[in-house]
């Protein structure tokens, strides 16, 4: 079996429901390497812009710290004052770096996975203490990719440091003979250039890591066909149960419809294939209304009920077919049927002596 072969029968893409559940649990495709690399790059930029302030603060602190106090000065109060002064001078200079690291880390995280707060990853999971599972993770594709990425990063940093130290070695050796102001600026410049050479390639490696994480996440979220069926059952209900419910609903609707047949004024038939029962109340309806209709067995049952309740049955195959196909149950007939239905009702009136109002 290859290292990246599919497992079992999970060959289907994850459904939106599965992805949403994973997101709620804090499971998303993200690269921590990308946050680190971009934070490093941003810090280099901030250091290049405001680094002189930090250098000056460190210079003043160094001068204070290396000064030899007299016995009267070198007491506890002097030490406390020196600490307070150190914090007061370094903190404002370091604040841009700390703020940048925190802000960039949050921003990159939001850009990768969106805004979602989940406490699920913080919950203790005792299965993580399983040593066998831990060993399996050490030899998993994820661990291999992480090891390769780590080796590339280490090699990159080592190569950059070697090249920079080699090119600036003579300058570094001469720093001891320079004034602090000049030597500190030279050291800061070397550091900035070195970090630039490290940060930019790290960002490129981190983008590759992000692409891999997204690909791996899609693989991990894949489902089997049975998983999808089970999800549909839990979401929409068991298809067999739904079918039984729909059948019961149709039966209830059919019984209610049949209960309206005895109240009809006329049943127009095909005479064998279709039956449409009409009711017309002048005070409540603008036109006759279809109170029951059906084909084949249902049509036969409508005719039976009509006979049992002495509801007139009128044979008109074209009209029966047209009403069955063109008018829904409970609707009044359209105007195009007025003349034909009026003729039927007039015929029934002659036989029965009038239509019930």
Image: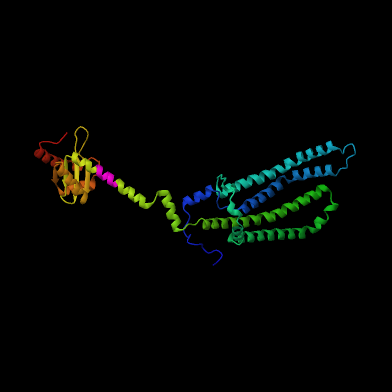
Q: Quadrant of the C terminus?
A: top left
Q: Residue at x 69, y 54 (%)?
A: 196
* Foreground pick, 132 / 7: 132
Left/right placement of residue 57 relative to residue 40 reads right
Residue 154 visible from this viewpoint:
yes
Residue drawn at x 59%, y 52% as measured from the top left:
126
Residue 91 versus residue 155 in the image, above or below: above
Seen as rendered, the residue at the extreme right is 71
In this view, 98 is above or below 132: above
Whole-percent x, y for residue 104 in the image: 63, 46
Is 113 part of what is drawn in magenta?
Answer: no
Above or below residue 126? Residue 6 is below
Figure check: 156 above or below 323 = below
**Number of callouts:** 0
Residue at 18%, 47% in the rendered image: 320
The stretch of residues the image draws in magenta is: 250-256
Q: Is residue 274 left or right of residue 129?
A: left
Secondary structure mostly seen in magenta is helix
The picture quadrant where one finds residue 354 is: top left
Q: Residue furthest bottom?
A: 1
Q: Nearer the viewer, residue 241 or 319?
A: 241
Q: Relative to 1, is 283 on the left or the right?
A: left
């Amino acid at each position: 079996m290859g290292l990246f072969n599919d497992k079992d029968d999970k060959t289907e893409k994850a459904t939106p429901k599965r992805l949403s559940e994973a997101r709620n649990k804090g499971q998303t495709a993200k690269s921590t390497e990308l946050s680190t690399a971009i934070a490093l790059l941003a810090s280099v930029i901030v250091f290049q812009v405001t680094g002189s302030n930090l250098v000056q603060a460190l210079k003043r602190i160094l001068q204070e710290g290396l000064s030899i106090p007299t016995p009267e000065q070198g007491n506890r109060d002097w030490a406390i004052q020196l600490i307070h002064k150190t914090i007061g001078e370094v903190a404002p200079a370091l604040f841009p770096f700390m703020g940048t690291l925190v802000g960039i880390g949050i921003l990159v995280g939001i850009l990768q996975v969106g805004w979602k707060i989940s406490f699920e990853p913080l919950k203790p999971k005792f299965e993580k203490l399983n040593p066998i599972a831990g060993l399996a993770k050490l030899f998993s594709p994820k661990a291999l990719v992480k090891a390769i990425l780590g080796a590339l990063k280490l090699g990159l940093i080592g190569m950059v440091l070697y090249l920079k130290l080699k090119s600036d070695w003579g300058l570094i050796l001469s720093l001891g003979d320079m004034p602090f102001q000049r030597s500190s600026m030279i050291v800061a410049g070397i550091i900035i250039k070195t970090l630039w050479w490290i940060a930019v390639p790290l960002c490129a490696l981190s983008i590759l890591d992000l692409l891999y994480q997204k690909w791996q996440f899609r693989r991990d979220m894949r489902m089997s066909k049975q998983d999808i069926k089970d999800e549909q059952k839990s979401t929409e209900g068991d298809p067999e149960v739904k079918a039984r419910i729909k059948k019961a609903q149709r039966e209830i609707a059919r019984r209610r419809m049949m209960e309206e047949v005895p109240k009809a004024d006329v049943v127009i038939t095909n005479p064998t294939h279709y039956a449409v029962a009409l009711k017309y109340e002048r005070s409540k309806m603008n036109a006759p209304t279809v109170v029951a209709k059906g084909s084949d067995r249902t049509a036969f049952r409508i005719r039976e009920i009509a006979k049992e309740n002495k509801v007139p049955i009128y044979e008109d195959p074209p009209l029966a077919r047209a009403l069955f196909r063109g008018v829904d149950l409970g609707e009044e007939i359209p105007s195009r049927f007025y003349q034909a239905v009026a003729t039927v009702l007039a015929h029934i009136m002659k036989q029965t002596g009038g239509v019930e109002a």
